[in-house]
Amino acid sequence: MVSVGSGGPSTQKPRASSATKGRLRLFVVQALVLSLFVTLFARLWYLQVLGGPAYQAQAAEQSVRELVVQPARGLIVDDLGRPLVADRTSWVVSIDRTLLLKMSTRVRSTLLKRLARAVHVKARTIRSRTLLCGEPGSAVGTCWNGSPYQPVPVAEDVKQETAISIMERGEDFPSVLVDAQSVRSYPAPYGVNAAHLLGYLSPITSDELDAAKARHDTSLHGASVVGRAGLEKSYDRYLRGRPGYKRVAVDSMGRVLGDSGQVRARAGDTVVTSIDARVQAVVERQLAHTINIARGTFDKVTGRNYAADSGAVVVLDAQDGRVVAMAGSPTYDPQEWVGGISTRQLARLYSAKAHNPLLFRATQGQFAPGSTWKPIMTTGALDDDLSTSTRLDCSSGFQVGNRLFKNYESASYGYIGFDKALQISCDTFFYRVGYHFWQKYGSDTSDVHAEDPLVRTAKLFGFGRPTGIDIPGEASGRIADRTWKREYWKANKGYYCTIAKKGGYDYLHLFAREFCAEGYRYRAGDAVNFVIGQGDTLVTPLQSARAYAAFANGGTLYEPRVAKAVVAPDGRVVKRIPPARIGHVKVSQSSLDYVDQALLGTAKTGTTAWKFIGFPLDKVHIRSKTGSAEVHGKQSTSWVASYDKRYVVLMMVTQGGTGSGTSGPAVRKIWEALYGVHGSDVHPSKAALPDARPPSRLPVFARDGQILPPATAGTGGTR
């Protein structure tokens, strides 16, 4: 009994404890579930209510792409507003990389082959253009260095019917876009080329793009083209304008659903130049004609026709240094660069066999000046101890040491003054001038610091340094004075001493032995060569033209300028580019006046007289100087430098023969065009420039987009 009674209570206590634990577990589970729901609802509330706008914006960003809208590049016009460089519409075929990469390899290959057949571009070329620079297989020059989300141009200047066909067959060309874009065109008024002046464009490089990003320049992007030469390079930041941006909505497959906003591109500014298209056309035709005539002319010295392998013409406004016309030969077609240039075309432009067409002889070519150097030397001599009454023998030859320096064709004119020596271009007269100053100041051949008034004068006229013209790549020329000769010897001594050690008695070994031992010495022969523009002294045609402008304007040196102003698309003048006066030639006015008067007689009785017969010299007062520079191993370089109080006209033809014989007729034709000369009369109404003077005002930019000459200025434009 006791055991039963006592066992009952002992079995009831565990049942109560188990029920309590069960209810506790249920409560805990319910609490956990409730907390999970609370957390879930709190998170949903946060995402949808509190953080909703931010996440919505992020989602929108993922479905919107920003595309660059290339601006129309600014125009380049001449002094009367005639377009030298403009823009035209080009159909461009591009590929959306995002969609292309989502295709299978087989579908992608089929698409590229189909597109290649349509646009007549090799499939592998299209593929290489779609690769980002830096990707495996990419090649510099063909890879895409723009945004990976920007459509990649793979074919430009596509025929309109081809472009329309691709657009109409969208199902056959998925990911292919067709767009009309603005590219460079060259209207060529009066048939002008002016390639070296205008320059060309090419795509921006990765390094240039990185540099632009580093300086926060938003006007450049991966699809930009930039100026590489001429005015296109010098004024690129004005011409290129400001790109726009178009935001397009896309679906998950990258297909464009529509526009979601756009920032309009700003067209580039117009560059107004001092170039006159009519004068430029005359200059280019005369240079080409002169070279063709020279190539058909027999050279008695070498026993073959003149090679006439290059040339240049410069026409300056002598009163302010502006370039009226400037041409070089050989030249190239700037249209070759539009839409990309082929490897074969580029090789020809850099080819020595084609005489390097990219080299602008007017500013980058460096040549011995020949007798056109003598007027500069005359001012130096007159400002020292020689005078206008000095008389020296114009003999057939002049002995210096063991060498006889001959006059041209061994002519002899007796004792004459500087004026006659300039007019007939007597070499032996100037040999004596150079020898006189060498004896006076520099007979110590090893004295590198010896005074030399002739060298000093050449530097005063700006030779030996760039003129500062506003187109890039200008050469500095070279004044072969004592300092230069010593530096040249130091730089080349090792080479020639090595040759000298090999022995031999031919010209090369004899020269090498002499150069190795005493190549630093400035001898009398160097001095007499220097004074007639021979030897190692080199100048550019532009440097010479600028020096003659100083004779015309009384001694002022200008930095030549091609651009006159930058004008915005709405006609507002953004920037005026005034003449840049850099100083006055520090020689006496009396010396300048004397040389000016002496050169006035060259066209009347001197070396150019036979080419100016019948020209109205009493109305157009032309001063001139000829030159025939001798170059070792080559034919003579022809020079004619001429000027009046308004213009400078200079022509140079390498391996072209004598100055007046080769270049004289063309120089006369240019003067006739400048002043409207017909026969023995001057007709300003027929002159290439209105009233035979460069316009002092800018063209008129009318509100309707027209560009009018300054003479027709009316209302509604900006001067």
Image: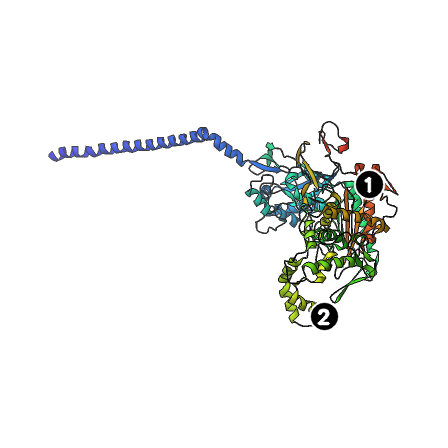
Image quarter (top left, top right, bottom left or bottom right) of the C terminus: top right
Callout 1, which amino acid?
Tyr
- Determine whether, in the image, residue 81 is placed left or right of residue 613: left
Query: Residue, x 88% and y 46% (percent of image)?
Result: 614
Label 1 neighbour load within 10 Å: few <14, some 14-19, many 20+: many
User: What x and y, as percent, mark residue 112?
Assistant: 65, 46
On screen, residue 59 versus residue 111, left or right, reads: left
Secondary element at image label 1: helix
Q: Position of residue 202 (x, y in %)?
A: 66, 46
Q: Which residue is mark 2?
A: 506
Mark number for residue 675? 1
Q: Nearer the viewer, residue 612 or 362?
A: 612
Task: Say whether disc 2 or disc 1 marks the residue closer to the N-terminus.
Answer: 2
- Crowd around label 2: few <14 · some 14–19 · many ≥20 (10 Å): few
Residue in the picture at 19% in, 34% down: 11
CA gap between label 2 and label 1 equals 55 Å
Q: What amino acid is found at the position of numbered circle 2 in the picture?
A: Asp
Q: Tell me if residue 470 can be seen.
A: no
